[in-house]
Structure formats: structure tokens, C-alpha cells
């Protein structure tokens, strides 16, 4: 009797243990599953910002712009407007033109003679809503209507920092939209080149095109180095004397309009007879040109817009210039306009190869200037637009000009 009772008790205990084990195991499994589900659905934090918040575009960056202003912008910028001469050009260089949501009056204008390669490559830019007048004369209400995430604003070459920063602060205050202000810079000297490169880098960071900004800077440096290397060992006594006339700046000009620091002359080691008159655009006296008597004269063919062929007509018809050696020896050549709503640097680089080919053909025997120009235009603006550009000026670019 005791044995039977003992066996029954053992069976009951065994069943109880099994039931307990099943309950515990089920609870652990439920907890494990619950933990896994919770792990999948819980937002992951990165630097204090959740994935959901990032998806909503709430993460921000603080950027120091080209004039030392600290500006907070969204991390992922895809809607911008450009204010100021040349600003949209830089955005095209960065391959970010699709981010544009509005343009100024110059970008919408139909010019009889168009000297901007980025416009030929992107005719759709004329169709965007108007945000204000040219040269940074913005309309805050119109900007607000197109709802950009960031306003990019460039200054004129050589413009001082104080007024530019003030303009940016004012525009930012009126619109409530972050304004990144940048010096346009130039390739005429090391200081302005550093400004240009830094501005490209900052703009590239704003629109997520940092690698492209570096690519542009490296391309410019490599091109300048190639030009320099081809001509660096030419003896001083064999370097050609040159002059560039008809240079456009805020409009078209005649023969006395020049640039003492014209970059293509510097890069191919030619002697600019106007050097020493500063680094910016100047108008010289015709008597000075006669006294200098350069071996070669290059004409910015944008001058044709003056009527009577502009600077070219002056060389043909002005008796005081008839005795110039370049005129008598038929060494007058046309180059592509490069100042049109600030500087088209792709045209500056293209002109340098043509000038090098004219002055030192043995050093540039592997270069077809027009093909090289299209290579450069394609890199900067995405299309080979030399023919389109030159056609606006009677195809007188990269040609000897008959007198």
C-alpha cells in the first residue's frame, strides 16, 4: 500500500515539474520575441537624432560661410536659390542645378548675344520662378514663395566682407531662410584663388557635392600646371609681348578695355604689356597701347556687341592704331568672352590653350583649341558648347582677325 502511494506521488511531482518547465520556457520565448520585436521597432539614435527624425529632414549642420558667418542649415539640402552674379554658375559646376527652385532676372533674360556656357548647357534655367533682380537685388517675398531650404549668395570679385555679411544677415532676417554668403574669387592671384576654392568647397558641402568640388579644384590646378609646364622654360628674351583688348565688364567695351593680370597670359608665360597697372580691369589710353606696341593683340569678341565691330573696328579704322606691329603683321586674334555676369572660368581656361597655340605652336602641337575647349566646357557645364557660344559672335573666336 505504501509502495503504491509512493509511486503515485512521484508521478504527480513529475507532471508538476514538467508543467512548470513548460510555463517558464514559454514565458522566456515570449519575452525573447517581445525583446526582438521591440529592438526592430525602436528608433536607432545617431548623435542624438533618431532615424525617424533624420527621415523627416530634421537634422542640421552649422556651416561657417565665406565671410565668417555661422549659419545653421538642414543636413540634406535639395532646394536652393542663387543670388548674385556667378552664383548659379558655381552651382552648375557642382552638378547641382536640379536643386534650383528660382532664379534672378538675369538668368531669365533672353540675351541677343549670350556669353555664358552654363546657360547653353541648361536652357531650362530660364523657366524657373523669378526671385528678384540681377546682381543680388533679391525680393524676399518671391524667395519665400518658392520655399528654398537655403539661399546661396555670392559677392562681386573684390567686394569687402562687411557689407556682404550685412546683406546676408538682412536677407536671412527677412525670409527666415538660411543664407550662405560667399566671395566669388578669381584665378588672377593666389588670394582670390583661395577664396574661389573655399567658396566652391563650402557650396559643395551645402548641397552634398563635396567630392565634385574637390574634382573641380583639382581639374583647374592640373590645367594651370599643364599650361605652365609647356612654356616655363622659354627664355625671357623669347617670350612674346601681348595685349588683350575689348574686355567685357558689366557691359561691352572697346580696344582700351583690358586686364593687367589676364590669367591666360600668366599661365603661358607671355609678357602682358599692361602688367603693372594693378590686378583688376582698367581702361588705358590709346597712346599707351601705341607706345607698348605688342607683338600680338587678342580681342575679346564680346566687343562686337558695341556696333561697328567694337575693338576690331577700331583697329581697322582708327589711324592712330594703324601702325601697331600686331596690326601690320596680321597678328590679331579673337578669344571667347569670359566676363558675362561675372567670370566664366571654363572660357578663361579654353582661351589659354588657344593663346598658347598661337604664341608657341611647337609647345602646343598636340592641342586642337576648339576640341580642347569642348573638353573643358563638358567638364564644367556638362556639354560641348563651343560652337553655340562662338556662333553668337560671328564665329570669330579662336580665329585670326583680318584687317
Image (cartoon, rainbow, N blue to C red):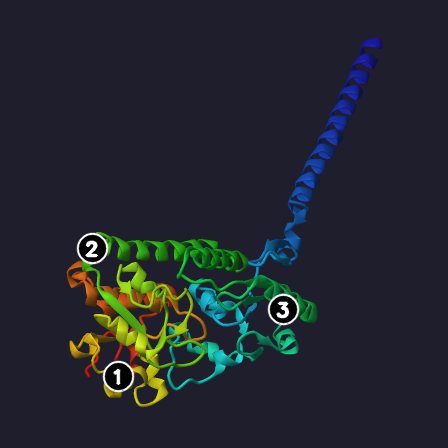
Q: What residue do we see at 43% from left, 63% from top?
A: 186
SS for dot 1: helix
Query: Quick check: 343 left or right of 159?
Result: left
Tell me which numbered mark, 3 or 2, is placed earlier along the sequence. Answer: 3
Q: What residue do we see at 69% from left, 35% from top?
A: 29
Dot 1: within a 10 Å radius of its alpha carbon, few (fewer than 14), some, or many (20 or more) residues? Answer: few
Query: Quick check: 247 left or right of 26?
Result: left
What residue is disc 3 on?
A: 167
Q: Position of residue 244 (x, y in %)?
A: 31, 72
Say which quarter of the image contains residue 115: bottom left
Dot 2: within a 10 Å radius of its alpha carbon, few (fewer than 14), some, or many (20 or more) residues? Answer: some
Inspect this view and state whether residue 127 appears. Answer: no
Q: Are marks 1 and 2 in contact (CB under 8 Å)?
A: no
Dot 3: within a 10 Å radius of its alpha carbon, few (fewer than 14), some, or many (20 or more) residues? Answer: some
Return the mark for residue 234: 2
Q: Position of residue 314 (x, y in %)?
A: 29, 85
- In whole angstroms, how far apart are the C-alphas of marks 1 and 2? 33 Å
Q: What residue do we see at 69% from left, 68% from top?
A: 173
SS for dot 3: helix
Along the viewing direction, whichever of 227 and 204 lies nearer the viewer: 227
Tell me which numbered mark, 1 or 2, is placed earlier along the sequence. Answer: 2
What residue is disc 1 on?
A: 320
Q: Give the answer, above or below, for where 135 lies relative to 202.
A: below
Mark 1 or 2: the one toward you: 1
Q: Position of residue 197 (x, y in %)?
A: 45, 56
Q: Give the answer, above or below, for where 251 lies relative to 68.
A: below
SS for dot 2: loop
Along the viewing direction, whichever of 368 and 207 lies nearer the viewer: 368
Question: Residue most toward the bottom?
Answer: 308
- In whole angstroms, how far apart are the C-alphas of marks 3 and 2? 47 Å
- In whole angstroms, how far apart are the C-alphas of marks 1 and 3? 46 Å
Along the viewing direction, whichever of 245 and 114 lies nearer the viewer: 245
Amino acid at each position: 500500500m505504501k509502495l503504491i502511494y509512493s509511486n503515485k506521488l512521484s508521478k504527480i511531482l513529475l507532471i508538476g515539474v514538467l508543467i512548470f518547465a513548460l510555463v517558464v520556457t514559454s514565458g522566456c520565448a515570449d519575452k525573447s520575441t517581445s525583446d526582438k520585436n521591440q529592438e526592430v521597432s525602436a528608433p536607432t539614435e545617431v548623435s542624438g537624432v533618431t532615424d525617424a527624425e533624420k527621415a523627416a529632414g530634421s537634422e542640421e549642420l552649422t556651416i561657417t560661410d565665406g565671410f565668417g558667418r555661422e549659419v545653421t542649415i538642414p543636413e540634406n539640402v535639395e532646394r536652393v536659390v542663387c543670388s548674385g552674379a556667378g552664383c548659379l554658375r558655381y552651382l552648375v559646376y557642382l552638378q547641382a542645378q536640379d536643386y534650383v527652385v528660382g532664379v534672378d532676372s538675369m538668368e531669365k533674360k533672353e540675351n541677343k548675344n549670350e556669353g555664358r556656357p552654363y546657360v547653353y548647357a541648361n536652357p531650362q534655367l530660364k523657366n524657373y520662378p523669378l526671385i528678384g533682380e540681377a546682381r543680388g537685388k533679391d525680393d524676399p517675398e518671391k524667395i519665400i514663395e518658392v520655399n528654398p531650404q537655403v539661399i546661396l549668395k555670392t559677392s562681386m570679385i573684390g567686394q569687402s566682407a562687411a557689407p556682404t555679411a550685412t546683406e546676408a544677415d538682412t536677407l536671412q532676417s527677412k525670409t527666415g531662410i538660411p543664407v550662405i554668403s560667399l566671395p566669388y574669387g578669381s584665378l588672377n592671384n593666389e588670394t582670390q584663388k583661395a577664396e574661389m576654392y573655399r567658396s566652391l568647397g563650402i557650396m559643395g558641402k551645402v548641397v552634398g557635392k563635396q567630392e565634385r568640388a574637390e574634382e573641380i579644384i583639382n581639374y583647374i590646378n592640373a590645367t594651370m600646371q599643364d599650361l605652365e609646364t609647356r612654356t616655363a622654360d622659354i627664355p625671357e628674351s623669347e617670350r612674346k609681348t601681348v595685349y588683350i583688348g575689348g574686355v567685357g565688364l558689366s557691359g561691352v567695351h572697346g580696344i582700351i578695355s583690358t586686364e593687367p593680370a589676364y590669367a591666360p597670359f600668366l599661365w603661358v608665360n607671355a609678357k602682358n604689356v599692361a602688367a603693372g597697372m594693378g590686378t583688376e580691369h582698367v581702361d588705358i589710353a590709346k597712346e599707351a597701347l601705341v607706345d607698348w606696341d605688342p607683338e600680338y593683340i587678342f580681342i575679346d569678341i564680346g566687343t562686337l556687341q558695341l556696333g561697328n565691330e567694337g575693338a576690331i573696328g577700331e583697329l581697322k579704322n582708327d589711324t592712330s592704331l594703324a601702325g601697331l606691329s600686331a596690326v601690320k603683321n596680321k597678328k590679331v586674334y579673337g578669344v571667347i568672352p569670359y566676363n558675362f555676369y561675372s567670370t566664366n572660368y571654363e572660357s578663361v581656361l579654353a582661351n589659354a590653350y588657344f593663346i598658347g597655340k598661337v604664341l608657341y605652336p611647337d609647345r602646343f602641337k598636340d592641342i586642337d583649341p576648339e576640341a580642347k575647349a569642348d573638353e573643358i566646357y563638358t567638364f564644367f557645364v556638362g556639354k560641348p558648347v563651343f560652337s553655340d557660344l562662338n556662333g553668337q559672335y560671328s564665329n570669330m573666336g579662336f580665329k585670326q582677325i583680318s584687317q
